[in-house]
Image: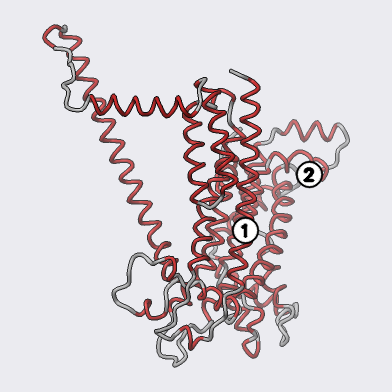
Amino acid sequence: MNRNILKRAKGVNVAVLVADLIAILIYIFLFVRAFIEIPVPTKEELADVNFIYNGLMISILAIFLMVSIPLVSMDIKTHKNKNDYDYDAWYAGNNFVKGLLSIALLNPVSAIIRLYNTQNLLVLSTGSGYLTAIKNIFNWIKTKVSSIGKKKEVDSEANLSEEEVRLRKQIRKQTAFIAIRTILLYTLIAVAAAFVFLPFYWMMITALRTFEETQSTQANFFIALKDMQWINFKYVLNEMDFGLYIRNTLFVGVVSTIGTVVTTVLAAFAFSRISFKGRETLFSVLLMTMMIPGELYIITNFVTVAEFGWITAEGNKIFLAMIVPFMTSVFYIFFLRQTFKQIPNSLYQAAQVDGSSDLKYLFRVMIPIAGPTIFTITILSVIGSWNAFIWPRLMAAMLPNNNEQFWLISVALNRASFMDPEGMRIMYNLQIAASALVTVPLLIVFLALRKYIIRGVGRSGIKG
């Protein structure tokens, strides 16, 4: 293996990743710029059967982002984990196909670099370049075409022994069984994926329809790129103040998550390492509270925040009432305690001998080891805060004069008016667009961080 060519191929791979990342940033900039420049219509215009906004450019940029971001994330992972011997002819062909895809994505810089690197990879793996590879492909096609119609020579089983015939039949049966099992398995996976994907797909295309199309009884399953009404999202964010509600929800979610992580780490450390009288009894009592439905705590929590004076006419302390009661979780404490208990106690004893304090041991030893579990708790806490409805809905009901500036996204979905100007029909395109604004961020977070969630859950249940 030519080390110089290998080094050059790796360097070009890095250049490709940089070019792709720059292209993604350009796509995002153009998408945001085009979205900002959408004129904000009135509700009467949106309800007009003749109103159609041409969102072709935004639709194309959205597709570019949906294709390029997963590809770049996979390329980064591949480049990070690839060994020297993985730079073979198959990888060269894969790189060539991605170069053609870069052309389709209007990313000529990445395409040129990829096509150039394909030459390096071919020379590295086969000792020849494009011309020889193309010649070999044509020879392979010519051989396949010439073999069509010719009878294949099959070994006659008459000259084989009984054992050889039996083995051949057994191999054929096993091959057929494996093929049928694989087909059935992937068919089942495809059907299950369709059941999961189709509702989400229908939500998105409904959010991009006109009001007239949502009222039709014969809605099309597909929608043209130029007919996608991105203006629905613009109206929901600007005119219906969902941008404000999203900021409120993020603020409540981030602050409550920080408080949850702090209390969870300290409590889990105390229940797993610090010995004090009644520790197991107290922890058992906490576990028993998990059997009580959370809705039963609403009355006591409401009385508590009311006595603290957090429910006021101005509503300026309402965020405290939404955050403080949920800055701890018994389930997360139990979840993290199981991970902490897997860490050998000898490390704690050695730290005590060295004169290390409990907090120093916690931050330098236990938190780094339990990092995946803490990361999982953080993600789940943010998602829980984002999806919370009952408590924010109650707090919103306590606000005088229907003070909407303190609504969270879940409350806004429930209380905002999506009726047409006459108040006769629901504008489902706006309602579904608002729902998509709540759903899509969660899906992005889960898809981007699913590896860490699964790793954290797995570590918490393994005895080690």
Q: Position of residue 148 (x, y in %)?
A: 20, 27
- Residue, far bottom: 422
Distance in Å between CA atoms under marks 1 and 2: 21 Å
Q: Relative to residue 168, is residue 139 depicted above or below?
A: below
Q: Quadrant of residue 115?
A: top right
Q: Relative to residue 398, is residue 26 depicted above or below?
A: above
Q: Which mark is residue 449?
A: none
Q: How many marks?
A: 2
User: What residue did someone put label 2 on?
Assistant: 363
Image-based side of 181 in relation to 323, left or right: left
Taking depth in this image into account, of 260 and 291 the one nearest to the observer is 260
Q: Position of residue 313 (x, y in %)?
A: 71, 87
- Residue, far front: 131
Q: Earlier in the sequence, mark 1 or mark 2?
A: 2
Q: Callout 2, which amino acid?
A: Phe
Could you classify mark 1 by the number of other residues whose Cα lies within 10 Å: few (under 14), some (14-19), or many (20 or more)? many
Could you classify mark 2 by the number of other residues whose Cα lies within 10 Å: few (under 14), some (14-19), or many (20 or more)? few
User: What residue did someone put label 1 on?
Assistant: 381
Residue 325 can be seen, yes or no:
no
Q: Callout 1, which amino acid?
A: Ser
Taking depth in this image into account, of 285 and 134 the one nearest to the observer is 134
Which residue is pictured at 45% across the width and 87% down the height? 420
Question: Where's the N terminus, which quadrant?
Answer: top right
Image-based side of 356 in relation to 86, left or right: right
Q: Quadrant of residue 326?
A: bottom right
Q: Position of residue 80 (x, y in %)?
A: 62, 35
Q: In the rendered structure, are the residues bearing label 1 and label 2 in contact, judged by CB atoms less than 8 Å apart? A: no
- Residue, far left: 158
Q: Relative to residue 339, is residue 4 depicted above or below?
A: above
Residue 168 can be seen, yes or no:
yes
Q: Position of residue 402 (x, y in %)?
A: 62, 87
